[in-house]
Image (spheres, rainbow, N blue to C red):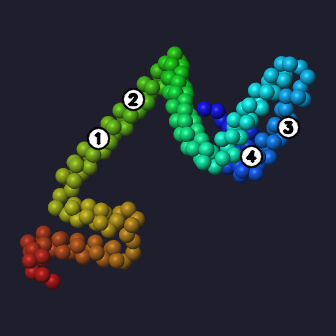
Amino acid sequence: MKDYYSILDVPSDAPQDKIREQYHLLLHAWHPDKFPVPEQKVKAEEKTKEFNEAYNILSKPDKRAEYDREYSFQSSNFDHTEKDREQKEQKRRAEEAKRHNPEYERQRQEQTEAKSQKAQAKRQRAEAEVQRKKSIGALGWVFDWLQDNIGFGRGGCSGIGCGAILLLLLIVFGCSIIFGTNWFDIGF
């Protein structure tokens, strides 16, 4: 399908009077009687036919609206598939160039090793955390709770309030261990 807007050299949102003005200007400039050489006259006649065809569609609102719907669908569909094809081709060429590059294989191997090392370090940290929690003992869960919920030890809790909570918990649990008393059953 021809692009009538480019034939008349107007934007797709051009008003009717601009289209009519441009059409008359182009007809005047490309009138076949202005060209003395027969080849030029033939070309001018072809151009005049194109201008007439474009103006016939764009000058009538209903035909223009139908043309806009069809042309925008076809051009966007074409552009989309063409762009996809070009992108796939560029990726293919880049991958092919990488494969022939000895540095690429070395970089790929280094990346694979780095990922493996990161995964191993993460597993080791998780195992160490499990071991730490097992070895903490009776009051260890209190410190974990304080760290997770209050932010104690991470800069999230500061001042007298946090220290008071920590001191109170240590006294309660320390006394219960020393005296064998369960303070939670007594109820303050």
| Residue at left offset 81%, top offset 42% | 24
Give amino acid for label 1: Arg
Mark 2 vs 4: CB contact within 8 A: no
Mark 3 vs 2: CB contact within 8 A: no
Q: Measure the alpha-carbon separation of dots 3 and 1.
A: 80 Å
Q: Measure the alpha-carbon separation of dots 4 and 1.
A: 70 Å
Residue highlighted by disc 4: 19
Residue highlighted by disc 2: 113
Q: Measure the alpha-carbon separation of dots 1 and 2.
A: 15 Å
Answer yes or no: is residue 87 visible.
Answer: no
Between marks 3 and 2 in the image, the one whose residue lies nearer the viewer: 3
Give amino acid for label 3: His
Residue highlighted by disc 1: 123
Q: Position of residue 129 (x, y in %)?
A: 26, 49
Figure check: 120 above or below 151: above
Q: Measure the alpha-carbon separation of dots 2 and 4.
A: 64 Å
Q: Quadrant of residue 83?
A: top right
Answer yes or no: is residue 57 visible.
Answer: yes
Q: In this orientation, which residue lies closer to the viewer: 52 or 181?
A: 52
Q: Which is more N-terminal, label 1 or label 4?
A: 4
